[in-house]
Amino acid sequence: MLKEIRDSLKLRSNQNLQKKQYSFFQCFPGGYGEGDHFLGINNPDIRLLAREYFSRVDFKIITTLLHSKYHEERLLALIMLERQFDQSCKKKSFDRQRQQEIYQLYLAEIEVINNWDLVDLTAPHIPGRYLLDKKDRAILYQLAGSGRLWQERIAIISAHAFIRKGFFTDALKLSEILLHHPHDLIHKAVGWSLREIGKRELNTELEFLQTHSYQTMPRTALRYAIERFPEPLRQRYLKGLA
């Protein structure tokens, strides 16, 4: 099965896309993706393969793919894992034990979830969704305080599962913790989270921006946070006049 999956991936590789991916994901020395490798496969093709194989692969195959040097193999493994988690949540096949096993595997392999797309496509749907009905969400704060870029992003992006259900407390706390993080990828994630809260409850976002001195927060975070504001209000925030 593993060889079949890898052969299916290679058949879909595109050299021109591969070159673009190395640039887009900053695989150059000093870039956040330094050392990563790409086959040149687009996301729709990877999703098609995930749909085909997710119900037939076990954790051994998924773990092997997660430890691949190729980005697309790790992405495919994570999407298959997310699909397995989603399947375990269906009413007819609801399986809490399976959900826990998938969640635990995700955390056990967190070191290889090491680029923003791998995080963003899975964090809300596996750790976020698993923790949705749990009182203990301390793991998110551990990740946010880990000092490791991708784990910090997993923490804040996982909270999008809560935002979508109208629960903002953890997302706001995590945004506060990470607000002045040194990396632009965290600024974007914080701003994105605030924007999603504001789409549902604008006053809550406005209160956060005022309480945490929007004039001094990272500009990228502010721009993402206010990009859906009415234009006159957005301009006031950009000019520090709100």
Image (cartoon, rainbow, N blue to C red):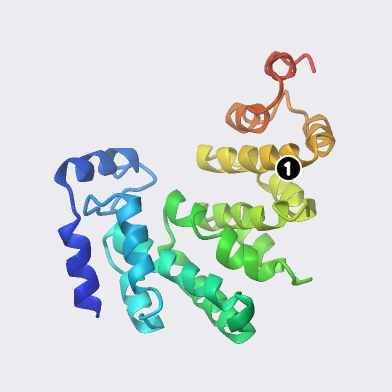
- Residue placed at 17% from the left, 61% from the top? 10
* Residue closer to the observer: 144 or 55: 55
* Residue closer to the observer: 17 or 104: 17
Q: Horizontal and vertical percent for residue 66?
A: 36, 69
Q: Quadrant of residue 241?
A: top right
- Residue placed at 64% from the left, 78% from the top? 91
Q: Is residue 84 left or right of residue 223?
A: left
Image quarter hosting the N terminus: bottom left
- Which residue sits furthest front? 92
Return the residue at label 1.
197
- Residue placed at 34% from the left, 61% from the top? 48
The answer to whether residue 141 is above or below residue 176 is below
Q: Horizontal and vertical percent for residue 114?
A: 42, 57
Q: Quadrant of residue 237?
A: top right
Label 1 is placed on what type of residue?
A: Ile
- Residue placed at 33% from the left, 79% from the top? 61
The answer to whether residue 164 is above or below residue 143 is above
Q: Is residue 101 left or right of residue 196?
A: left
The answer to whether residue 84 is above or below residue 186 is below
Q: Quadrant of residue 99?
A: bottom right
